[in-house]
Image (cartoon, helix red, strand yellow):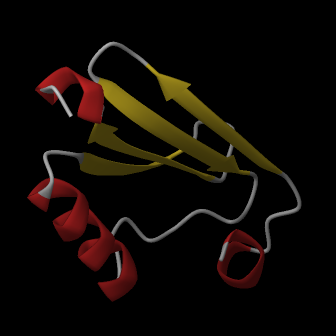
Amino acid sequence: NARKHAAATKLVIKVACSRHRVTLDVEDDGSGFSGEIGLGLATTRSRLEAIGGGLLVAQRDAGGTRFRAWVPDGRSSGQ
C-alpha cells in the first residue's frame, strides 16, 4: 500500500513486545496522506479496538507516514 498509494521507496517495519502489548510500527518515505483515513484503515482501527488495541496514523516530520498498531499481549490476561 505504501508503494501503491504514496510512491514510497523505503519502509521501516518494527515489532515490539512489552509486558502488556505487542506493537507494530510502519514508517514510509512516501508522499504522506491527506489527514483522513480511508475505509481500509477505519476498518482496521475498528477491529483492533474491538480486541483492546488501537491504531494511530500520522504524518512524519521528514515526510511520509507513520502507522502504529497495537494489541494486548494475550499472556497478560492469563491466556
Residue at the extreme top? 19
Whether residue 33 sits left or right of residue 2 in the image: it is left
Who is closer to the viewer here, 24 or 60?
A: 24
Q: Residue at x 26, y 20 (%)?
A: 20
The mark tally for this picture is 0
Whether residue 51 sits left or right of residue 4 in the image: it is left
Who is closer to the viewer here, 76 or 72?
A: 76
Q: Position of residue 77 (x, y in %)?
A: 13, 28
Q: Residue at x 24, y 48 (%)?
A: 54
Q: Quarter holding the N terminus?
A: bottom right
Q: Residue at x 51, y 41 (%)?
A: 24
Residue at the extreme right? 9
Q: Residue at x 31, y 86 (%)?
A: 39
Residue at the extreme front? 79
Who is closer to the viewer here, 1 or 59?
A: 1
Q: Position of residue 11 (x, y in %)?
A: 78, 51
Vertical side of 70 occupied by 44: above or below: below
